[in-house]
Amino acid sequence: MSYGRTFPLWRDAAGDSWHAYTRHAFVEGLRDGTLPRAAYLGYLVQDYLFLVHFSRAWALAVTKAETLEEMRACAATVHALLDEEMRLHVETCAAEGIPEATLFSTREAPQNIAYTRYVLDAGHAGDFLDLMAALAPCVLGYGEIGTRLAAEAGETPYADWIGTYSGAGYQQTCHEVGRLIDTAMARRIGPDPAQSPRWPGLCARFETATRLEVDFWGMGLSG
Amino acid sequence: MSYGRTFPLWRDAAGDSWHAYTRHAFVEGLRDGTLPRAAYLGYLVQDYLFLVHFSRAWALAVTKAETLEEMRACAATVHALLDEEMRLHVETCAAEGIPEATLFSTREAPQNIAYTRYVLDAGHAGDFLDLMAALAPCVLGYGEIGTRLAAEAGETPYADWIGTYSGAGYQQTCHEVGRLIDTAMARRIGPDPAQSPRWPGLCARFETATRLEVDFWGMGLSG
Amino acid sequence: MSYGRTFPLWRDAAGDSWHAYTRHAFVEGLRDGTLPRAAYLGYLVQDYLFLVHFSRAWALAVTKAETLEEMRACAATVHALLDEEMRLHVETCAAEGIPEATLFSTREAPQNIAYTRYVLDAGHAGDFLDLMAALAPCVLGYGEIGTRLAAEAGETPYADWIGTYSGAGYQQTCHEVGRLIDTAMARRIGPDPAQSPRWPGLCARFETATRLEVDFWGMGLSG
Amino acid sequence: MSYGRTFPLWRDAAGDSWHAYTRHAFVEGLRDGTLPRAAYLGYLVQDYLFLVHFSRAWALAVTKAETLEEMRACAATVHALLDEEMRLHVETCAAEGIPEATLFSTREAPQNIAYTRYVLDAGHAGDFLDLMAALAPCVLGYGEIGTRLAAEAGETPYADWIGTYSGAGYQQTCHEVGRLIDTAMARRIGPDPAQSPRWPGLCARFETATRLEVDFWGMGLSG
């Protein structure tokens, strides 16, 4: 998936880290169904907490936007996360007897803290673009993984996860976020961002967030 | 209107400032229709810009919330501001030949800068309660003014303004914000906030924001 | 005074606002001694509060710096403001019987709130450069005013004010801040910032802060 | 060491985590000299980066302070970190042929990211107290460890590390930070903080930061 012009460039610049993230053993276990149920549930609980802080990061983006379009796009993502994406987590966990209050009060794994707080700090330390570069690997990586798994997966108990991220709703979010990033880059840096002195720093933000995604899958596997 | 338990206490503590705000000549001009149209339009353009930054402040509240209920309530307010309350401004101005792009690019009046940035800084400097105390005068004061004007106003060209803020949708927002504040206070300070060392500081936040509202009306009158 | 390459460009872009700020009647009153003592003291009390929040803005810059040199330069400015520049205010006011605790607890004028909170929000909304553009008019403008007044002033009771801002210590701070800005611009935008899409936005930050300086002098005069 | 009234309460509430941190195998290796040199140097490089972001967190505290005393105490800590504590790291690494530029550009370990960004987010999400509770385990824990090791250590190549943290300068910082926290608690919560609804949340901040310290030592050992 391309999701715009900037994302493929960031993805290429992330090199092996991107592959390590999107082809992680956890992902392949979702695809072929070999992922242990306990690992999946442990991941889902942590991912619920991840979404709480990821929503905070998208809300931070509203405060750092420069146009009404940027504000509305970020506010819509906060809404999508808090009111839609979390539903998969809440419903799946409820079916396993884990109520939402338990999800919210679970202790965050250090890999979860590292990733979410890194994203939030990227926003506080820098501008809207720094925040977008740190947000992109999760949003768009899940879209890419979901699309591939929907095409490649056979029978797997994790079809609902794959369906969520390959589904039209989530894919539309990815395309909108890709456009949001492209427009924000053009507005602040110009037509050729890769020539800007900021480019290496933005690529580094993206790659660091990607490596923290790898650690997050690792937590899920070992969990 | 009471809008919960905390608001009436803050309002009383604000003393004359509250009266100066809610009974301002600008407000009375809306009620009896004597407010010059040019003053109203000038106010509406500035208030549009106000809502841009006020939305940013509610988005900041999402990042400072401690529970999912707080997060969702604040995110819903961002949505209500960006997608609903601004509509009055956009439609009224459009009818006068002022497009939304003009609204967005208008120079902010210093009274507008003072108020909105004070609220944002209250959030950055303090916690969720400091931010709520600075947000409350605008949200709940407009609800109080709208309700009174709906009861007292005769023929006035500003019936649409009065209808917006006295309407069921806006009043429901006020009741929800009142509850949000009460719950947030109990969660962080306990059952008797007025006995807390934080109480004078929170009252001062509320009163300063109220005085900045008075200046905002003054800006509207002087056009 | 040039204080580096960026500052003269921002100053030129601010047009009449810069003149309105640096040649304000309040400034001329400092120069020729016609400024009423009460106005000066009223200004000094508000300026003390201004420095409190201005120090907070420079501390915010430490959190948004990208190099150790940037961090150290901003931290040194926090120190200079909190421990040196404020001394003029504290000592002058003490000589008039106004203790420091009174300074700290004085009600901020709305012009003071507008300016300081605008600068802080420039930092939170944007990156290090946005914050620098909002900080520059005060730091460097006072350096420019101090230098001119030291050359032009005759007998005036405000020689201590003029001495503070024309003095070697303050002028060195100005030169260092000018270099800090130039280096930060080159690092993030490249060798020709005026060609960047960010340039108009940075100039707008500088000019808005300059206009808020004009209002601050106005407050001092009418004080 | 007690370092005031609040710290011992937080330390007790952290239970086993505090012991796991202050009696970590890395610490005992410093004491008896069995810590491999390579592990020590790897730790020192990461700790240098830690101090960069820890300085940012203390600068954030300046922006969230409510009194001039709080502002000055936090600004002094920024200065102590940037200009004094880092010197041990720079000098020791220089003696091993590692220049400061290499330190600054080293990739941060995930345990480093987790800890520093957690502290910064504690400040952004909450108020001054939330930030203090997240800052305390590092500042005061190192003071406690340094004091114990100075009393217990025999011959060890890490005497300079022990000397830094047991030395009068660092111990004075600890006592000042302890007083800063006590005063800040009294100012915002009152004479009996442990009865406040905020108490469990502040203890949780302290304990999470303590656990992230344990992970940091673990990184040092395995590094």
Image (cartoon, coloured by chain):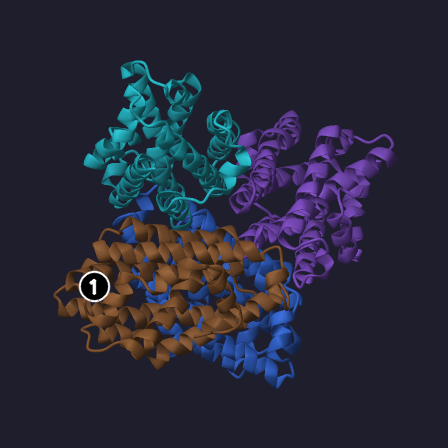
Chain colours: A purple, B cyan, C brown, D blue
Q: Nearer the viewer, residue A95 or D131?
A: D131
Q: Is residue A6 above or below residue D50?
A: above
Q: Quadrant of residue D169?
A: bottom left
Q: Quadrant of residue A202?
A: bottom right
Q: Is residue D163 left or right of residue D168?
A: right
Residue pictured at 53% horizontal, 45% vertical = A60
Type of the residue with mark 1: Tyr
Instruction: Tally the numbered discs.
Output: 1
Residue C46 seen in the current view: yes
Q: Residue furthest bottom?
A: D95
Q: Residues within 10 Å of mark 1 (few under 14, many from 20)?
A: some
Residue pictured at 58% horizontal, 64% vertical = D217
The residue where tag 1 is placed is C40
Residue D58 in the image, given as x and y percentages of width and height? 43, 62
Q: Is residue C129 above or below residue A186?
A: below
Q: Chain of mark 1?
A: C
Quarter placement of the C terminus of chain A: top right
Residue C58 seen in the current view: no
Residue pictured at 52% horizontal, 30% vertical = B79
Is disc 1 placed on a helix, strand or loop? Answer: helix
Residue B40 in the image, given as x and y percentages of width and height? 37, 30
